[in-house]
Amino acid sequence: MSDVAIETVGGFGLLFIMATEQEYGPELKARIRPLITGVGPVEAGVGTAAFLSRLGTEKKPDLLVSIGSAGSRLLEQGEVYQASAISFRDMDASPIGFEKGRTPFLELPAEIAIPQQIGGVQAARLSTGSNIVSGAAYDAIDAEMVDMEGFAVMRAGHHFAIPTIALKGISDGKDELHHFDDWADYLHAVDLALAKVIDRLEENVAAMDRAYWTKLPEGVERR
């Protein structure tokens, strides 16, 4: 916890959240000190919630930034995209009448739109789940990119009335994954591309007011 920093950007407190040390390359290390939660929606949700719960109210960030790698067979590898909306592909209560992807008894849609968008960064829909998607598995994905943490980070933030944006560098997806290096080979490019986006965040964040950056998605109630 002592190595994690809430960064002041454009007058707002931003907490960057990543899954792994492998994604935390030299360019990002020169710019941010993120919370590293571990891989997958369970670790991301637990890690994010535990960290936020230990902060006093006056120390909580204004915005969470889920940052790291993602897969896509449609988007350009090595480029960064922001999430325009995030869904949870593991949720399927359709046998008892609920829309696939929608959590039963919550007044939230299957795909949650992100109100905050960063100028000059391409947007794409993000699907979060506990599996690594590769090859033909993309046929079942109703989104342009996939990760394993974004939705969980976002929902943990909602519990504390903190919105989330997601910045994802595309590390794989054009070809089927067969071993670790198929994912890791592009992490250096993702590190550099994410760092360039962070360098432009100050101007982008400062351009909008507090009401914009602290707005929660439609349907999410402040606790």
Image (cartoon, rainbow, N blue to C red):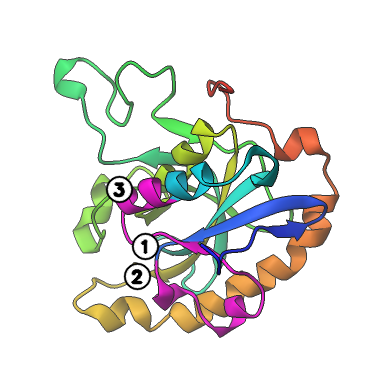
Q: Amino acid at mark 2?
A: Lys
Q: Secondary structure at mark 3?
A: helix
Q: Which residue is mark 3?
A: 42
Q: Is residue 120 among what the camera can see?
A: no
Q: Which residue is mark 1?
A: 73
Q: Amino acid at mark 3?
A: Val
Which callout, 2 or 3, points to the residue nearer the camera?
Answer: 3
Do callouts 1 and 2 mark residues in contact (Cβ within 8 Å)?
A: yes
Which residue occupies 25% across, 50% down? Answer: 139
Which residue occupies 34% across, 54% down? Answer: 148
Q: Is residue 34 above or below residue 90?
A: below
Answer left or right for 51 relative to 58: left
Q: Is residue 19 above or below residue 100?
A: below
- The location of residue 215, given as percent across then percent down, is 68, 32
Q: Quadrant of the C terminus?
A: top right
Of the pair 26 and 128, the residue shown nearer to us: 26
Residue 174 bears which disc, if any? 2
Q: Amino acid at mark 1?
A: Arg
* 1 magenta-colored: no
Query: Which quadrant would residue 134 be assigned to in this image?
Result: bottom left
Q: Which residues are magenta?
A: 20-47
- The location of residue 162, given as percent across then percent down, is 60, 38
- The location of residue 218, given as percent across then percent down, is 57, 24
Answer left or right for 118 relative to 172: right
